[in-house]
Amino acid sequence: MRVVELAGIGPAPFAAMLLGDLGADVVRVDRPEASPVGIAAAHDLTNRNKRSVLVDLKAPDGPGTVLSLAARADVLIEGYRPGVAERLGVGPRECRAVNPALVYGRMTGWGQDGPLAPRAGHDIGYIALTGALGMIGAADGPPVVPANLLGDYAGGSLYLVVGLLAALLHARLTGQGQVVDAAIVDGTTHLTAALRSLLASGAWHDRRGSNLLDGACPYYTVYETGDGRYMAVGALEARFYGEFVRLLGLSTDDLPDRHDTRHWPRLRALFAERFKAADRAEWTSVFDGTDACVAPVLSLGEAARHPHLSARGSLTEAHGTVQPGVAPRFSDTPGSLRLPPALPGAHATEVARDWQVSALAVPQARSAAAGRGH
């Protein structure tokens, strides 16, 4: 599968990376100017498993160069504000005119239409509007920002990839491509389906820190240990809860009914007191190898050293950088980390050859690109 990615930031590059991880031939069309992200190109993992060419879309020959790539591609991904690709001459109409089977993926925060469509935004605002951000955090505190994992990458990138693959299947069956409008507000709202089911059935309170799965429940939350670190507890089922309580040094016979929410504050206080009695390493050792559903809360650096993640290759070292492995796994066609992050314009000659397009611009003064933002 051939993918053209018009360079941008956030969820669109991540979606293209995922396709590249799974084996697609991804060509990233970089701009001559430096990226606003400020990440050194050699360390931008969202550009792994890609090749890069430089194209100035504002130059007279820029749009034509992109259209020559689109004519040979299966998928094109862009993450501009609505209307920008059209103004640049590389919108769906122009691209599909040269390739009717092309799947044209559009990644935005607000979507291609609606009152907010032309407005700027970021992950935090998108998830705020969907109700997702308002669910995260303690009842007596502000909402907790989940980095940009929930909106940009879960509600954005992953939904774009699902849409692209579904549209690609349709294109291969019919010969006709289509436009995929992936909006972070749509994907994030879609992610709340199960919780909205609970809300509709009366099993979920529409307020933060008051429910079984939002940290309010004393056996589905986090506890501080004696050394100021944390353990995560997810002992929902009865047998897991029993194991959790036993290993904590308590007895279920001496505890109040866990299903009665009026007892939750007392249970939380008891569990909190026990966790404070030892440090995280000690509790990790206590719960290791059990079905109590308790795990240490690790930092990114600590996670890279966890034996389970190492054994599966969930985190691995490739091309001199510790990075996530390929997900998901396939029995017959596994993905791989075959290319390091692409330096802007580094593959112009080979892409022109492999895709059989006219000569592409080779960057002249980009030798320091690996150390600068791209």
Image (cartoon, rainbow, N blue to C red):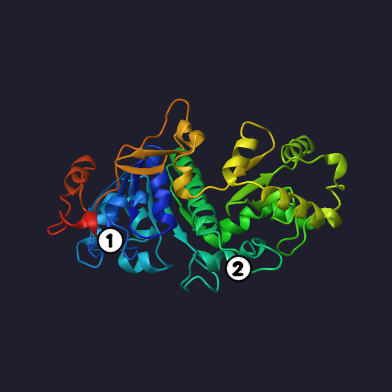
Visible residue check, residue 326: no
Residue depicted at x 57% and y 59%: 186
Q: Nearer the viewer, residue 277 or 371?
A: 277
Say left or right for 94 vs 175.
left
Label located before the other in sequence (1 or 2):
2
**Neighbour tally class for label 1: few under 14, some 14-19, many 20 plus, Cα within 10 Å:** some
Residue depicted at x 40% and y 34%: 335
Cα gap from disc 1 to disc 2, whole angstroms: 31 Å
Q: Where is residue 165 in the image (x, y as percent from the top left)?
A: 47, 43
The residue singled out by tag 1 in the image is 373
Q: Which of marks 1 and 2 is in front?
A: 1
Element type where label 2 sits in the image = helix
Say what amino acid the circle numbered 1 marks: Gly
Say what amino acid the circle numbered 2 marks: Leu
Q: Where is residue 313 in the image (x, y as percent from the top left)?
A: 44, 34
The residue singled out by tag 2 in the image is 129
Say above or below: 35 vs 18.
below
Asked whether the residues under the numbered discs 1 and 2 touch, taking CB atoms below 8 Å apart as contact, a structural biologist would say no
